[in-house]
Amino acid sequence: EGVCVWRMVRHMFSNLLLLWSISHDLYITGLTYHNLFSVPLDLDVRLRRLDLSNNFIRQLHTLALPYLEQLDLSSNQLDLISEGAFENLARLEELNLSRNVLNNNVGSNGKALQSISRLKSLDISMNGLSDDAVELYLRNKSSLDQLKMTGNALTRLSHNLFKESEGLRVITIDDNQISVIEQGTFEPLSQLETLNLAKNNLAHICDFKLHQVKYLNLSRNSVEFFVTREDDQLYRLEILDLSHNKLLYFPIVPKMNSLRYLHLQNNLVGTLNSEATMVSEANALYYEIMNEKTVRKNNLHSNWRLMPLIYIDLSYNHFRSFPLETFNHLLSLETLNFSYNCLQNITWNVRNDESGYRRQLFFPSLKYLDLQSNGLVYISPLFLNALTQIETLNLQDNSVQPCASMDQSAPQINLNTSCVVFGQLRTLKHLNLKENNIKMLQPNTFLKTSLVSLNLARNSHMGMQVGSLEGVQKTLQSLFISEINMTSSDLSLPCMPVLTQLNISNNRLDVIPSSLSCSPLREIDIRNNHFASLNHSLFLALSVHLNLMYISGNYFNCCDSKWLTILHELKGKLPDVSDTVCFTSDSNITITEYLKNPSVYCLFHTKISLSASVCVLLCIIDVALTLVMKYNGKCGNSYAVHNIYILYLITRICWHFSF
Ligand SMILES: *[C@@H]1O[C@H](CO)[C@@H](O)[C@H](O)[C@H]1NC(C)=O
Ligand SMILES: *[C@@H]1O[C@H](CO)[C@@H](O)[C@H](O)[C@H]1NC(C)=O
Ligand SMILES: *[C@@H]1O[C@H](CO)[C@@H](O)[C@H](O)[C@H]1NC(C)=O
Ligand SMILES: *[C@@H]1O[C@H](CO)[C@@H](O)[C@H](O)[C@H]1NC(C)=O
Ligand SMILES: *[C@@H]1O[C@H](CO)[C@@H](O)[C@H](O)[C@H]1NC(C)=O
Ligand SMILES: *[C@@H]1O[C@H](CO)[C@@H](O)[C@H](O)[C@H]1NC(C)=O
Ligand SMILES: *[C@@H]1O[C@H](CO)[C@@H](O)[C@H](O)[C@H]1NC(C)=O
Ligand SMILES: *[C@@H]1O[C@H](CO)[C@@H](O)[C@H](O)[C@H]1NC(C)=O
Ligand SMILES: *[C@@H]1O[C@H](CO)[C@@H](O)[C@H](O)[C@H]1NC(C)=O
């Protein structure tokens, strides 16, 4: 979309410039054409930019545009470029030939392309190009800075390929079938910073040598291992994407590296049982590849120790235990994505120190830890202790039971219990415990944390003891307790003076907790509950801050509706009001319908109460009259009988109306 907008803007802008320059008789800057079958003949020689993309052009003959800098011929049917086609384009710097059929007439096209050595950017993606064609097309390109060859038919990159384009800085060759990269293909490209080889067939990176490259994308190949021979060179690699491959081990990275982002998601790392096995096998592999007989040291760890990594994604791998000692080396690591592995338990499986004591390791920079969907039951308190800077912990879709708070006077950690102690995570701000099958939230569970957001959703049948949010009620801004099947008597919330977002949808609630009057709620979701009406004064207090409220899926009584009048003022802040139904004594209508003319729908209701009060009044008068008559004894029995009959009638009518 961004590209489209940019193109539009670019076209508008260039057309404007065109008008401007025509009227000022200056260089023409840009021009765009549509529905062309060949290049127009009457082009202004002063053109600098020509966009002929998305036409039906099949052949390109000599262009005489000495000022042309950018030429876009993408998405045509170009299969023949005359040898001399570009000879008179002395200033051409950017050429886009993507989405054509340039795997034909390779000889002629090759000669044409070889004649433009000033080119800085060339895009020959999606042309069905073979290895040989590309080798021809890349000759005489000493100024080339960016090259894009996405979606061709390359299988092998030879050391001759970039021989005449050694200034390349950015190379994108994703989505080909490359399985071989010859020694010396990229090494001579001293300016190379960005190399994208995603979606190819590469299986082994045995000897990574590109110390100049900053960004390397090897995602979606079949890479089984990635090994760098240890040397004392500084590698500039900052971003390495090895996701969606077949890695069994962590990559063996350069000793002196600048790696900050490491993408290893969707691999097979952790398949081998223990961390120790994995590390020793990786090292054994290293020495095997280096042709040395014995493993001399722990290369994996010694190199990881020097890595300034801040982000690692290991989601969708096969870990059954947490690689504590490996991560312990990553002193700058801030984000660790460990979701979708098979951890079950995080035990403190660390070798003891020399004197036999249990070692406490730390993850001193870790702020964001994602452990979603691991089947976790148990997390050692020593592990949680190691998370000294943790801010966000995602434990969604596990089986973790939070512990009640520890006795504060004896802060000893009970290593035996299978529940998880959150109280010690003092830096924790965001905790996701959605879908953990939590049975009971004990008092003081989060006592010493400073939680800002807490997600307890979809723990169906979870009980919440009074005081379970004790200690976080002053910091909590966002609370999710949806899909728990809770009734109002199960829900007790403290006064939370900074709570702005609350989701209590999909429960069986019929009363909004009145403690919410403390909270400056901006967003509230009460969908799919048993509310028949909302407390008017509470709702009035809430409506001051309310910005978004979801209410559908309840069974509201239209005629018990003092609170509904407030809805009028909240118009536009109730996205699902038109899906919300309320009932009157004889029908269900949408609240929107009801609000259009409230008096019509509940008229009957109003009448009933009116007639009922009139009846009661009449009855009282009648009884009083009768008594007075009787007392005076004037009109005798017949009047009394008559009166009793009328009283009977009125009572019947009254009875009929009142109920
Ligand atoms: C070339 O054109 C295609 C299709 O219009 C576009 O997606 C691509 O980004 C262009 N290449 C460059 C290097 O601008
Ligand atoms: C390389 O390009 C230059 C012009 O930039 C041209 O003079 C020269 O003939 C080209 N070489 C070949 C082999 O085409
Ligand atoms: C690597 O390439 C893949 C496939 O094109 C892409 O999805 C991914 O975002 C890239 N990785 C990085 C870190 O840019
Ligand atoms: C972690 O990985 C999962 C699965 O790939 C993804 O959905 C989630 O957004 C990632 N988390 C972070 C913080 O990147
Ligand atoms: C995890 O720990 C529980 C009890 O602490 C134990 O029953 C279970 O077998 C352990 N699971 C694994 C995979 O180690
Ligand atoms: C913890 O377990 C060990 C044996 O597994 C037992 O000896 C010890 O008494 C237990 N401690 C507590 C506090 O339950
Ligand atoms: C919610 O609780 C009710 C009553 O205990 C029960 O009948 C119903 O099946 C529960 N619903 C879910 C989704 O657990
Ligand atoms: C509230 O929670 C439900 C169920 O967990 C979810 O579908 C809904 O999108 C949430 N509402 C908001 C406003 O995020
Ligand atoms: C309505 O809410 C107010 C607080 O705003 C509370 O004092 C009152 O008791 C509530 N009424 C009912 C019927 O719950």
Image (cartoon, grey):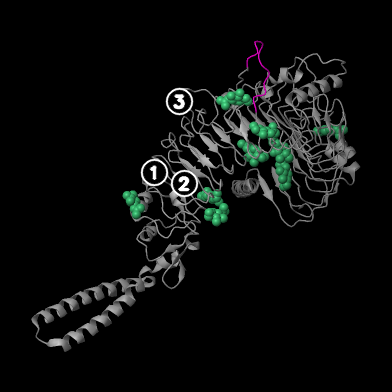
Q: Where is residue 92 shown, x and y percent of the image? A: 74, 38
Measured in 3D between alpha carbons, the distance from the residue under mark 1 to the one under mark 2, in whole angstroms, is 10 Å
Evaluate whether residue 69 shows in this view.
no
User: Marks 1 and 3: which is nearer the front?
Assistant: 3
Q: Position of residue 502 (x, y in %)?
A: 46, 46
Check disc 2 and report the residue beneath it: 502
- Disc 1 and disc 3: Cα gap in Å? 29 Å
Which of disc 3 and disc 2 is earlier in sequence? 3
Q: Does the magenta stretch include residue 17?
A: no
User: As shown in the figure, which amino acid type bears the numbered disc 1?
Assistant: Ser
Task: Decide: is 450 above or below 600.
Answer: above
Q: In this view, does 595 lie to the left or right of 462?
A: left
Residue nearest the observer in this picture, 411 or 604: 411
Percent coordinates x, y for residue 276 in the rendering: 75, 23
Part of the protein shown in magenta:
347-357
Picture quadrant of residue 155:
top right
Mark 2 residue element: strand
CB atoms of marks 2 and 3 within 8 Å:
no
Q: Relative to residue 108, is residue 590 depicted above or below?
A: below
On the image, numbered disc 1 is attached to which residue? 519
Callout 3 secondary element? loop
Q: Does the residue labelled 1 lie within 8 Å of ligand 9?
A: no
Ligand 2 quadrant assignment: top right
Pick whichever, 466 or 564, lies toward us: 466
Which secondary structure class fits the magenta region best?
A: loop
Badge number at residue 408: 3
